[in-house]
């Protein structure tokens, strides 16, 4: 093979090496993407099989009798469970966010009177609307009151799993407060009280310590989650196997090209040495 032909062949082999190296890098990138996708699928599967659901046990009036009912814990169900059996009166529960503000689902739930805010109507507590919030302030039995009500529309989420309210209780975004209502003799006023004028004070309560709330694993979506995981995992692994085969073929071709490349280089070097000897 002449010098010119060898040089041309070397250029072709160089281009071929570059193309194979580019394809190898491309396959490596695609395999990394698949690995990331499989990790995401695995995380989703783990989350769905480890998710928990809070249930609320409450007493409801059915005709002349009271019955125990277990429902999904939502903001609405919690507030309603603290009302009288017929749904009237002021709820014994309210919810605060991490900033200490009382949260409701809409502005229509803002209190308009001291009684609606959970304070005696004769306490001197005032309720003032301030833009998109309501401020309740005053003095009750020598204790300063300053409550700020704001809207968090996401509290209306009533999904069966992972609802916004439950998630907020677990991570401390929301805190439940309960009205510790007592009469003048120190006796508790229950939800069946006909009084619409609450007496007592709001106290923070831990949801985990409330007998009305049970927090258990939610298993109804486990079978679906497993099926989705197995399908996605099989698809990703099949694609990765094909890419692995392609990568091995490219590596074999690259090794063959390198061998030929080195051989052509030696031919060129030999031709150059021969030429110098001829003219020396």
Image: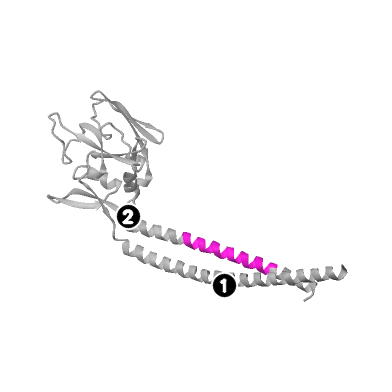
Q: Earlier in the sequence, mark 2 or mark 1?
A: 2
Is 229 contained in the magenta span? no
Badges 2 and 1: C-beta atoms under 8 Å apart?
no
The residue positioned 36% from the left and 56% from the top of the image is 47
Task: Say whether residue 204 is left or right of residue 18.
Answer: left
Q: Residues within 10 Å of mark 2 (few under 14, many from 20)?
A: some
The residue positioned 77% from the left and 76% from the top of the image is 1
The numbered dot on residue 51 is 2
274 or 261: nearer the eye?
Answer: 274
Q: In this view of the protein, can residue 7 be seen by the observer?
A: no
Q: Is residue 89 above or below residue 255?
A: above
Q: CA distance from mark 2 to mark 1?
A: 44 Å
Q: List x then y, in percent, for residue 111.
A: 31, 35
Task: Say whether residue 266 is left or right of residue 237.
Answer: right
User: In the rendered structure, which segment of residues is drawn in magenta?
Assistant: 14-36
Q: List x then y, in percent, for residue 147.
A: 32, 32
Q: Is residue 5 above or below residue 210?
A: below
- View extreme (right): residue: 279
Badge 1 element: helix
Q: In the picture, residue 134 is in which quadrant?
A: top left
141 or 195: nearer the eye?
Answer: 141
Q: In this view of the protein, can residue 191 be seen by the observer?
A: yes
Q: Quadrant of the C terminus?
A: bottom right
Q: Which residue is mark 1?
A: 249
Front of the two marks 2 and 1? 1
Q: Is residue 137 above or below residue 250?
A: above
Badge 2 element: loop
Q: In the picture, residue 24 is in which quadrant?
A: bottom right
- View extreme (top): residue: 142
Count of residue discs: 2
């Amino acid at each position: 093979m002449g010098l010119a032909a060898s040089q041309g062949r070397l250029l072709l082999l160089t281009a071929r090496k570059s193309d194979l190296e580019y394809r190898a890098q491309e396959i490596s990138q695609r395999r990394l993407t698949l690995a990331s996708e499989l990790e995401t699928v695995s995380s989703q599967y783990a989350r769905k099989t480890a998710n928990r659901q809070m249930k609320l046990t409450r007493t409801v009036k059915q005709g002349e009798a009271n019955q125990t009912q277990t429902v999904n814990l939502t903001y609405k169900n919690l507030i309603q469970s603290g009302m009288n059996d017929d749904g009237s009166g002021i709820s014994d529960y309210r919810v605060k966010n991490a900033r200490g503000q009382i949260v409701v689902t809409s502005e229509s739930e803002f209190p308009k009177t001291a009684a609606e805010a959970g304070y005696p109507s004769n306490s001197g507590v005032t309720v003032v609307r301030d833009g998109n919030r309501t401020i309740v302030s005053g003095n009750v039995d020598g204790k300063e009151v300053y409550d700020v009500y704001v809207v968090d529309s996401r509290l209306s989420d009533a999904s069966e799993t992972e609802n916004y309210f439950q998630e907020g209780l677990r991570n401390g975004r929301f805190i439940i407060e309960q009205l510790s209502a007592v009469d003048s003799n120190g006796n508790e006023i229950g939800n069946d009280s006909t009084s619409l004028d609450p007496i007592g004070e709001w106290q923070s309560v831990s949801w985990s310590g409330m007998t009305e709330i049970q927090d258990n694993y939610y298993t109804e979506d486990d079978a679906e989650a497993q099926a989705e995981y197995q399908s996605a995992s099989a698809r990703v692994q099949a694609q990765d196997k094909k890419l692995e085969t392609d990568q091995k073929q490219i590596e074999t071709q690259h090794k063959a090209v390198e061998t030929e490349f080195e051989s052509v280089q030696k031919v060129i070097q030999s031709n150059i040495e021969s030429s110098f000897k001829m003219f020396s």
